[in-house]
């Protein structure tokens, strides 16, 4: 069985033909060009999908698509995706079906990354887990008893906007002191730059003093791997924030496996060890049993694989 | 159809005969006397239940019981209830069945208070809601699609221990800055006493200066109702804390009706208005739709009614 998995991002659209058992058959990518409007996006995307089907000469049973916004319980409509200007309420499934002639189902991209991890990734033997994606923003997906938990309207799992300090920094949404405001790529970079500016003798100061805007989390990980104490401290402080947020997820949901992915998660142990230690310390003791933080390396592919999986499971 | 609903507390055990349609037929209460050990508790309780059945001359179809601890997914066993010393893992259902000869099912008391509100209380027309019980501790119950959400092991909904400020005060559990540490009865009383001590001209100072330990949240509500500005400020600050916690519950669960009960909740608007305002301010805009805080007046009866409901629904 073959389906199409699409990850519609603000910058690029990634498309995959996926075989249920074997995984990727072929992948493709086109620029989103959100500024040209949604009709243009759907036209270009439909074109690319049809090309991919023709080239590979397969008959996909459906299209699954991840979109960066809140998706209704009908899994056809997205509401005000922040990175797609001019979209208010759009029936994405209908637009694709009209153009490609194949049934389509959509879901929030972070939820699909979680489903991708559940079906093809590190969580494939875990029934219930919480996925935190540390990217530009911090997204979340909750898998409970092998299904995406969607809440009452389809918007559950805004894990980046769970407050751990109501005096904390503001994120791009209007929440204060959520982990997006600590661990979102730009927030972490800015926080790190602020600290490094105060340490002119540090190797990172020398590297970035001409333009601290170039500093990214990956530079912190690299420096930490080279033994840079300041970088280790910065990542530790950030990891602790993640730990507090994890306490909140677990105390509410009683789901104890935490799967972390995304660019910032590549910092690995420098982030995960302090997160684990902090969560363990502040979890009520019965919740410590079975608690674990696991790194998902699927990266950008997770949402495409999750999208394809959703098509397999809901459209067949 | 008639069942028995029991609320096993650290101080008293409340017992009710409940008719599915009409509600309470008869109620009774005995002291828990936890210090005499669990055999004594079960013996006294079974005696009282049998007396109640004989007096009312009914044939209950089952027993539902709320217990103050974590209840397994089998709904028969409780693990280390903090207010019942000497209980490690106890098969409560078996102990009752052995003594009374009627099928028994147990559940966490805060979960049953939520179920009671869903079946007999203010939430009877709400499919999914989050119940926060502001008592000595702060308990929680999550009703999702008309059922108790139990998570992976049965311990979901520890809403009093969701961190809103990782620098905040410690609660009796080892969590820091959860709302129990702000709104739990003793925490709120102590916080209020600390502030009132600094205001010798305030009417509450005069009332309690001989022994601030006597101050309770109900005194704050009374003073607030009389226009005492300091009492209003204290309750406002506490209500704001509740508001931050509500943001966390909603961003994770996408369940937007919050039902609040318990002694401290009697402060009513002095607590609820600031909670509502704060939550509204920090919720991501799409989550504001349908958001509401509702007071549940069932009080102590909620858990008994929830226990009886659980018996109706799971044992018949």
Image: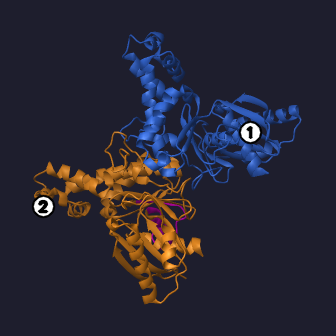
Chain colours: A blue, B orange
The residue to which callout 2 is attached is B207
Residue under label 1: A5
Specify the quadrant of the image occupied by residue B229: bottom left
Magenta stretch, residue numbers? B110-132
For this rendering, which residue is in front, B204 or B150?
B150
Which part of the image, by quadrant, shows the N terminus of chain A?
Answer: top right
Q: Residues within 10 Å of mark 1 (few under 14, many from 20)?
A: many
| Secondary structure beneath label 2 | helix
Please tell me if label 2 and label 1 are on a single chain. no
Q: Is residue A255 left or right of residue A90?
A: left
Percent position (x, y) of residue B311? Answer: 53, 73
| Residue at x-position 44% and y-position 83% | B50
Q: Position of residue A200 (x, y in %)?
A: 38, 11
Asked whether residue A265 appears in the rendered view, the answer is yes
Residue A26 on image: x %, y %? 80, 31
Q: Is residue B302 visible?
A: no
Classify residue A123 by image quadrant.
top right
**On the rendered structure, is A113 left or right of A212?**
right
Report the chain holding disc 1. A
Q: CA distance from mark 2 to mark 1?
A: 69 Å
The residue depicted at 38 percent of the width and 60 percent of the height is B86
Regarding mark 1 in the picture, which secondary structure is present there?
strand
A159 left or right of B223 in image: right
Nearer the observer, A167 or B284? A167
Location of residue A264 with respect to B38 vertically, above or below = above
| Total numbered labels placed on residues in the image | 2
Q: Residue, x 77% and y 51% (percent of image)?
A: A315
Mark 2 belongs to chain: B
Residue B208 picture location, percent across and down: 14, 59
Magenta stretch: includes residue A214: no
């Amino acid at each position: 069985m073959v389906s199409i998995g699409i990850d519609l991002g603000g910058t690029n659209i990634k498309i995959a033909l996926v075989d249920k058992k074997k995984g990727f058959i072929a992948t493709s990518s086109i620029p989103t060009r959100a500024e040209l409007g949604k009709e243009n996006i759907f036209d270009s995307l439909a074109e690319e999908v049809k090309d991919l089907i023709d080239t590979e000469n397969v008959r996909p049973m459906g299209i699954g698509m991840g979109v960066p916004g809140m998706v209704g319980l009908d899994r056809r409509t997205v509401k005000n995706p922040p990175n797609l200007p001019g979209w208010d309420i759009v029936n994405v499934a209908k637009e694709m079906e009209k153009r490609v002639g194949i049934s389509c189902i959509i879901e929030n991209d972070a939820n699909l990354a979680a489903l991708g991890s559940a079906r093809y990734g590190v969580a494939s033997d875990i029934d219930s887990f919480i996925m935190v994606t540390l990217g530009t923003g911090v997204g979340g997906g909750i898998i409970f008893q092998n299904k995406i938990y969607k809440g009452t309207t389809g918007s559950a799992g805004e894990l980046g906007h769970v407050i751990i300090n109501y005096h904390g920094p503001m994120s791009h949404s209007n929440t204060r002191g959520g982990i997006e405001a600590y661990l979102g790529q730009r927030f972490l970079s800015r926080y790190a730059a602020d600290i490094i500016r105060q340490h002119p003798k540090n190797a990172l100061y020398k590297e970035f003093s001409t333009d601290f805007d170039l500093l990214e989390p990956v530079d912190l990980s690299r420096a930490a791997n080279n033994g840079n104490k300041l970088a280790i401290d910065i990542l530790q402080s950030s990891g602790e924030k993640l730990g507090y947020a994890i306490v909140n997820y677990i105390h509410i949901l009683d789901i104890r496996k935490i799967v972390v992915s995304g660019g910032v998660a590549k910092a690995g142990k420098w982030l995960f060890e302090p997160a684990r230690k902090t969560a363990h310390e502040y979890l009520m003791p019965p919740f410590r049993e079975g608690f674990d933080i696991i790194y998902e390396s699927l990266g950008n592919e997770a949402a495409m694989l999750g999208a394809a999986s959703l098509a397999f499971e809901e459209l067949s």
